Amino acid sequence: MASDVETRLAADLSGARESDGSTRERVLQLVVEEGPISAAALGKKLGLTAAAVRRHLDAMTEQGIVEVHNVTGKRKTAGRPSRRYVISSRGQEVLGDDYLNLVRSALEILESHASEHNEPDTVDDAGVASDDEGSTDSSGARLLAKEYFGRFETRYQDELKKIEDLDERTERLAELFNSDGFAGFTRLVGRDSPLLAMQSTQLCQGHCPIREIAEAHPVFCEEETAMISRLLEVDVRRLSTQAAGAHVCTTHVPVGREKLAAERRASAQAGTKTTAGRSTPRRKRIVISPRQQERLS
């Protein structure tokens, strides 16, 4: 009998630990996607009390996985500043790094170019070899960045080529980024604006597996942005990157201009005037203002 009781107790403790770990993962995921965020806001999204969420946040803060930012409101009051939580550099490491694949790509490129260029392009008066196209570091980093993101692009193209709607393509690309460890998600901007052309989607990445390399070589961010633009078949603009110190990499996708152009083409073909608005697929909406965007970046 004692053995049965001990077995049930062990199973209960194991289940409690598993549930606790699952909740903590959900808390961390939301901090990655929506930080800076308060414990109260996290609790509301997860259906938990702020105290329950704060227990997980305190544990992750102690471990160095998340950081606390104190935010003071516009109105000066005697109360304490509001606490907001963001992912830390240590948390980024916990989410995982992709240096192994990057190093492998680097070795492949270096071996390839070593066989193609046995002699230096030019030699200066001091006898130092140099490359006519620029420094070895710059050109080598860009070649490596192209190789690294090219592998993602090849796989993503097959997933996106049948999706015509830009909003849907962006959402699918976010899902693909998420599955590859970039913590991809989207924010919808300007959906309540009467001006259709002002609507946009922000393609966000809460984790960068190669952040430290991108800090030293910004060409990685440039090549990733170019890849996103090619995959979505529209000009995009990078609003923030983790390599530059932001908590989230954010890419502006101007979906409104595409929708407006499509409506005008349809109206021209039908011989009718362009309508002022158009219903969009029902999706989760996160509408933010420019001031909120500054805080998020």
Image (cartoon, rainbow, N blue to C red):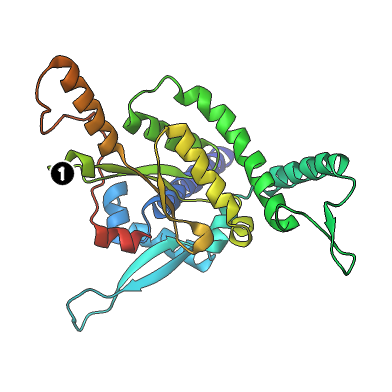
Vertical relation: 252 (above or below) 281: below
**Residue sitting at the far bottom:** 78
Residue identified by numbered label 1: 192
Image quarter hosting the N terminus? top right
Question: How far from the left and from the top, in percent, is residue 259?
Answer: 25, 31
Q: Secondary structure at mark 1?
A: loop
Q: Is residue 50 above or below residue 188?
A: below
Quarter assignment of residue 239: bottom left
Q: Residue at x 55, y 56 (%)?
A: 92
Residue closer to the observer: 289 or 134? 134
User: Is the residue 111 above or below the residue 158 in the image?
Assistant: below
Q: Residue at x 47, y 39 (%)?
A: 228
Q: Is residue 37 visible?
A: no
Which one is in front, 152 or 23? 152
For the C terminus, which image quadrant? Answer: bottom left
How far across and down, in percent of the image, does residue 245 sit? 49, 64
- 121 left or right of 19 in image: right
Residue type highlighted by circle 1 = Asp
Image point 57% across, 28% down: which residue? 155
| Horizontal and vertical percent position of residue 74 | 20, 75
Give coordinates of residue 248: x percent, y percent.
44, 55
